[in-house]
Amino acid sequence: MITGPMIKNPASRDFASSAPPSSGFASTGNASNLIELLMSQAERAGEQRAFTFLGDDDVETSITYAELDRRARSIAARLSRMARPGDRALLVYPSGLDFISAFFGCVYAGVLAVPATFPKPRRPMPRLISITKDCGAKLALTTTASLAMFDLSLSPELAQLHWIATDETDDAVNGWERPPINGDDLCFLQYTSGSTSEPKGVMVSHGNLLANMELILVGNGVDRQLGENPARRGVFWLPAYHDMGLICGILGAVYEGGHSVLMSPTSFLHRPIRWLQAISKYQAEVSGAPNFAFELCVRKTKPEERAQLDLQSWRVAFCSAEPVRPETLERFTQAFAPAGFSSESFYPCYGLAEATLMAAGNRGPGGVAVKRVLRAALAEHCWADAQDDPESHVQRMVGCGGELLDQRLAIVDPHTRLRTNRHAIGEIWTKGPCVAQGYWGREEETQHVFRARLADTGDGPYLRTGDLGFMHEGQLFVTGRVKDVIIIRGRNHYPQDIEHTAEKAHPALAYGAGAAFAIESNNQERLIVVHEIDRHHRDTDFDDVIRRIRAAVADEHELEVAGVALIRQAGLPRTTSGKKQRVRCRELYLASELNLLSHWTAAEPAAPRAANGRAVHGTPIPLPRTNRPLGEDEIERLGQQIEDWLLQWLTNRAGTPLGDTARDRAFAEYGLDSLAAVELSQELEHSLDVKLSSVIAWKYPTPASMARYLAGKVGGAAATSGAGPTALRKRNAAGFARLLAEIESLGDDDVRRQLAE
């Protein structure tokens, strides 16, 4: 795989995969790789801000193109003393600007960057270990503060890596020599699995990146809308290790010579309004996210907050990485039209990591193409126009654009490998310079996925996306997946990994007898786990089994289980050869036809809200109305009230009977994921009128410990006359809580997803 000093494409291609055609965008020049790209931007607009990171405390930190070029050279000079071109380096960073310098430092050294999820502090790091083994990483780059938080003794594989804190690197560039890189050389590995086992690294070349960024630029129509050589402004909260966050939020800005404002995923999840406030403040033209983010903005913002926004500048609101729902886009438009947002700005598109990022889109935004098709036809793997049929018989679908530049699409029968007829649904195949080079170290899978050819003409090679859909009037409509990948909040999860995690949660669960899948509820995808109970454990406490499954999946996959069905042994539907039929299992679950022993479902994801916007999970917490310090007895009484509120919250949010909640049981044992933890901090903020860390449930992991902390905090707040959230935010801005708030994110693969892949 290594040819000369650089890593080359593992196989020749039938199409050009080097530099993209020029769009006439003056800032891109004729760069054939990312080194030339950044160097040309540093020379052209060195003192222009390239990136600004907006912290949770609203503090801005920025870096110019010249500073980024200098930092990249400095890091590259240091890397070149301990690594060869082609070596792999993990990038393990919290949200911030350090990741960007490290990524370009790797590029400048010819080292393959491997963006990785930032792990929880002082916890096992199974995903990092899996990626390390898969790519054979030699180095790991991070920050000084982060390195101090990792317990590398938990993993010999990670301990043996050469860890480098890049924020300790000075700006001296002595010793840096520019490596001989061209468009065919690999640039980085994008790991697609959102789970902990068998991650797959997509090999992305410099040519792939440049071609895809040109595709995005032309598709978004930014060059036509903003004029020649604009300084495009964008706002992004997607994590940098996610392909959408990396390419749209970071590399795309460099390609266009623009300015990106970045924020942490946790910052968005904690207060979705902050994303929109940043777009309003910086008058951003480009921003986007998976479908769930737009839905969350509608659900988690109040009219008085929306009234303060100015979204007229938002010209490209891309939506991708998971099914795009017309209902979500309509609700978002209705909610934010008073702030100047136009439905014409929406830009649904289609992509995946194996195609670098974007694979299909329109030429510029201009509204949403919605098609009404019959549900019954979709079930038969074809599509038919809905005429005057009842809405209950109709599925509304959003068009994701079509072919752009040299990227081509085909709808193919996955079994015959022939193009489908006009009304048939088939697998989406794509070819062109954006298609990546394959999976690292997986030649057989690479041949199957990246080297497909049509059976009759031999046309190819095509990328088999694993997604199903059809084309109509130049628009791609995605209907489902060939693969069983589960997409929740923009992140991809492999069901077999979730099933493996669930299976280990309790000895009563039969070996290899579980199925995980997603169902739609309240316009959101929610995870369901079905599992057989071993016949020798029929007397087991099924409630305990369900609790353990939820806790294990939340801990290992950052996913909240919405339903668990325990069934009799041999009750899982299988093929004649013994393979699991997940689709059939989902059908039986929805039809209530499984042979159940026990069944649990969570409450609907959206909590009801009072007129003032506060959640109404339970009785409001009565607050002390005094400016004097609270006495010990008063704090103790308040602590008990908060504890009672927390137990009631768990009853409603986690679907756990009140009698089964316990003051000293960790929140994680109730199967709550990171989004639930963020929602808890939000509701406590509303109820107690104090500023809290979005990961307070990690620092105070039980109702009892959290109640004690909050009672003391409120008691102190009461003693500060007029001390509102602003004063409290300043008082709590430093320290470990803020650091933790920066590290919790959506998880992998992705935007996300989520988000994302």
Image (cartoon, rainbow, N blue to C red):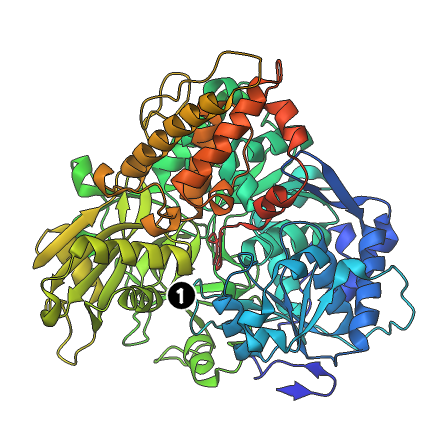
In this view, the residue in front, 150 or 71, is 150
> Callout 1, which amino acid?
Ala
Q: Report if residue 124 is visible in the image.
A: yes
- Number of numbered discs: 1
Residue 125 percent across, percent down from the top left: 51, 66
Helix, strand or loop at label 1? It is: strand
Of residues 519 and 747, which is closer to you in this image? 747
Seen from the viewer's position, the closer of residues 667 and 408 is 667
Residue drawn at x 16%, y 66% is: 532
Where residue 631 appears, as percent x and y from the top left, is 51, 20
Q: Position of residue 630 (x, y in %)?
A: 53, 19
Q: Residue furthest top?
A: 626
The reply, left or right, for residue 587 in relation to residue 291 is: left
Looking at the image, residue 102 lies above or below residue 650: below
Q: Is residue 466 above or below residue 374?
A: below
Look at the image and tell me in which quarter the N terminus lies.
Answer: bottom right
Locate residue 278 relative to residue 430 in the image: left or right: right
Q: Is residue 533 above or below residue 619?
A: below
**Residue plotted at (66% across, 34% down):** 57
Q: Nearer the viewer, residue 702 or 180?
A: 702
Question: Where residue 276 sits: x, y (%)?
Answer: 56, 32
Is residue 543 rendered to the left or right of residue 95? left
Residue 230 visible in the snapshot: no
Callout 1: 10 Å neighbours few (<14), some, many (20+)?
many
Q: In the figure, 55 relative to 608: above or below?
A: below
Residue appearing at x 77%, y 65% in the figure = 35
Residue to which mark 1 is pinned: 410
Tell me the residue at 84%/48% (across/down): 45
